[in-house]
Image (spheres, rainbow, N blue to C red):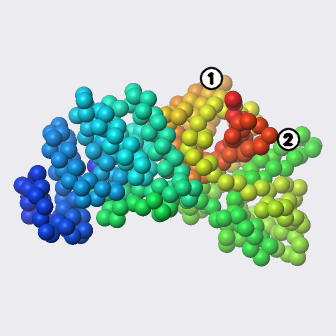
Amino acid sequence: MSRPPVFIRSLILLIGLVGLFPFSPVRAQEDAAERRAAIDGMYPVMLQALEAKNFGRARNICDQAIIWEPQNPVHHYNLACIEAQAGGDRLPRAFGALELAVALGFNDSMHLQNDPDLAPLHDDPKFAEIARKVAENEIRSSTGFGSAKTDGPRASPGDKLGAPPATPPTKASVAPTTAATEGPAPASFREGVPVGLFFMTRYWSFTSTLEKAAWYFAPDGTVFQNLEHGFSREDLAAHAGPRGKARLDGKKLEVTWADGKKSSSEIEREGSGFIWEMGIFTTVRPFDYASDVAGVYEGGESLSFGGDRTIVSRRLELKADGTFTWEGVSFLGTTTPSSRLSAGGTNTTTGRWQLSGYSLIFTEPGGAVLRRIAFPYDDDKTPLKPDRMFFGGMMFNRRP
């Protein structure tokens, strides 16, 4: 569960609610607005009862919220927390409530995996399966592949989920929830200038190397080379790599970079992508489901961050339970998503991973967070789907 925001409600209402449990139906509560006001007042009482281990009282309050708003997944999630803490023969009921919350669209993967109230469920294999489904809900809600969405507060792990919003989530509503999940503009061409996210590959014969990078052509004509973090206004403003302005000059695409230098070459459209300056630019799409990312990867290709370091990663394992092990790297930074990687022969980093749209987010136990753009890069001729993953400038090969 998560600690609610401070609801400024009438003390008379709160006292009245405390005295009414178990509730008797009253005419005013048949009105949606009145029920919403009642739920806002009920939640602090329910959370106090849970903290006092008065599980029966907490359960009665949560059951009433479910009666009034049966389609709101947060109520069912909170009931699962109550039953999990009650333990014993209530654990099957906890799983039932949690599964119903997921079916109704609960999609806060990180909260689910870090909520201490659900700790009694972690050792059961069913919890890993539920975590996978929540991750799938999350990717659907942030990219449009599917329809699950939770409009409730997305609190930090360890908090308690407060009273959900008045409007229950619907299966048709799809929207990003945080800056980290904002997606790129759809791939297209506007007056001959590309728009969208493209994966660029360019072979350099004199070094026998294949350059790989994520390029983003924003709708306003701004070009971001080696884009790492995301597509929100804040992410683009903080971009440390090359940026410039694109325009079409006859048949040539010209990019004027921030340092005044220009790149100009004829642009040759090829399907939804294009060829420019000896580079092949192909459109990309996010992973359809977070479960598609889980697996073991090996990366032996150099990875450039900001032009000042090269990193060779070894083995990356993304487990279905949301944990990861990454050999050969360590995180440098604080709790911001701008942490850097450091290579080392014996370094091993562990923690939790989360996929949100195009963002793959790693959080180590010390709190350092690394967020980079990730997308599948598949070869239709291989049985693995996908057989490779691009992450922050590096191409990882997936092991069978």
Q: Position of residue 353 (x, y in %)?
A: 52, 39
* Residue type, mark 2 in image: Thr
Quadrant in the rendering for residue 26: bottom left
The residue located at (22%, 49%) in the rendering is 63
SS under mark 1: strand
The answer to which of marks 2 and 1 sits earlier in the sequence is: 2
Task: Name the residue carrying label 1.
Answer: 346
Q: Is residue 250 above or below residue 263?
A: below
Quadrant in the rendering for residue 53: top left
Locate residue 108 relative to residue 41 in the image: left or right: right
Q: Is residue 283 above or below residue 97?
A: below
Q: Kindly tell me whether residue 72 is visible in this rendering.
A: yes
| Residue at the outermost right position | 206
Quadrant in the rendering for residue 220: bottom right
Q: Which mark is residue 156?
A: none
* Residue type, mark 1 in image: Thr
Toward the viewer: 26 or 333? 26
Q: Can you say which quadrant of the picture contains the N terminus? A: top left
* CB-based contact (under 8 Å), mark 2 and mark 1: no
Task: Name the residue carrying label 2.
Answer: 209
| Residue at the outermost left position | 19
Tag in front: 2 or 1: 2
